[in-house]
Amino acid sequence: MKVVILCGGQGTRLGELTGNLIPKPMVKIGDLPILVHIMRYYRHFGHREFILCAGHLSWTIKSYFINYYQTNDDITIDLMEGAVKTLKQRRSDDWSITIAETGASTMTAGRVKKVLDYLNDDDSFMLTYGDGLSNVDINGLIDFHNHHGKGVTLTGVIPPGRFGELDLHNNQVFNWAEKPTVTDRYINGGFMVMRKKFADRFIAQCNDDIMLEREPFEQAAKEGEMMVYRHDGFWQCMDTMRDWEMLNKIWSNGKAPWTF
């Protein structure tokens, strides 16, 4: 199953880290961009085909992966012959990566729309944000999605209430509230699974200025096409400097829940 990752954000609240020189998903946790942490997590569950919806400073993502091994491993450079040899390759990541230019200011629904052609006829695909880490059971999430047969499955988490609360009954979403007023309920933590036919119906007609978390999800909830996979384990987004510091502290302690 292919994994679509939304990587076009500017990360304005992380300006001290990005300096408007790198997109948010390229901000490092430890010595690796948070995007790589996310991709390695999916790969652990057997998923190696990635579609990155790039936008703001997209060339930095392209450059990073074009030079992936040269960036992360020891190299020898022969200036006379123009040859670069990678030494002591520490890891062999076998990913297939499509990096799509989805626009610097395109909203999330518009970004997904622009990569639908890369999904071929796959029944479902995974979708997540390029700034969140978790230890959600991807296999359990997919099994749940396949079993209920609805159009989209969100992973519901319970962090401090800052995002879109989910009004639930028997794991079906009946209402979508983008701006919550209560802080003790499940919210959308990303790590979604979406049927292609759902995307073709709810997203394919969206303009670039439409957010996935507004009209498409609101309509899906009203029509009973949205379910939530409840996750009570670790989840943390990287929305602020405080979040970044927390994730780096967890990583430096060698106890990161998203690693194996």
Image (cartoon, rainbow, N blue to C red):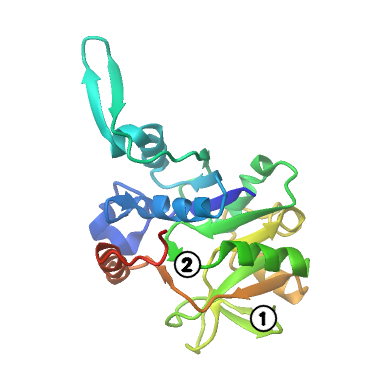
Crowdedness of circle 2 by 10 Å Cα count: few (<14), some, many (20+)?
some
Identify which amino acid the numbered label 1 is placed on: Asn
Identify which amino acid the numbered label 2 is placed on: Asn
Q: Please report contact status of discs 2 and 1: CB closer than 8 Å, yes or no.
A: no
Horizontally, is 218 left or right of 56 in the view? right
Horizontally, is 77 left or right of 167 in the view? left
Please identify, in this view, whether the residue under mark 2 or under mark 1 is nearer the observer: 2
- Does the image show residue 151? no
Decide which of 125, 11 is in the foreground and name it. Answer: 125
Label 1 sits on a secondary structure element that is strand
- Does the image show residue 126? yes
- Image location of residue 231, percent across then percent down: 54, 75
Residue 17 falls in image quadrant: bottom left
- What residue is shown at x 58% (from left), y 67% (from top)? 213
- Image location of residue 184, percent across then percent down: 49, 89
What residue is pinned by disc 1? 175
Residue 98 falls in image quadrant: top right
Disc 2 or 1, which lies upstream in sequence? Answer: 2
- Image location of residue 240, percent across then percent down: 32, 68
Residue 140 falls in image quadrant: bottom right
Label 2 sits on a secondary structure element that is loop
Q: Residue furthest top?
A: 80
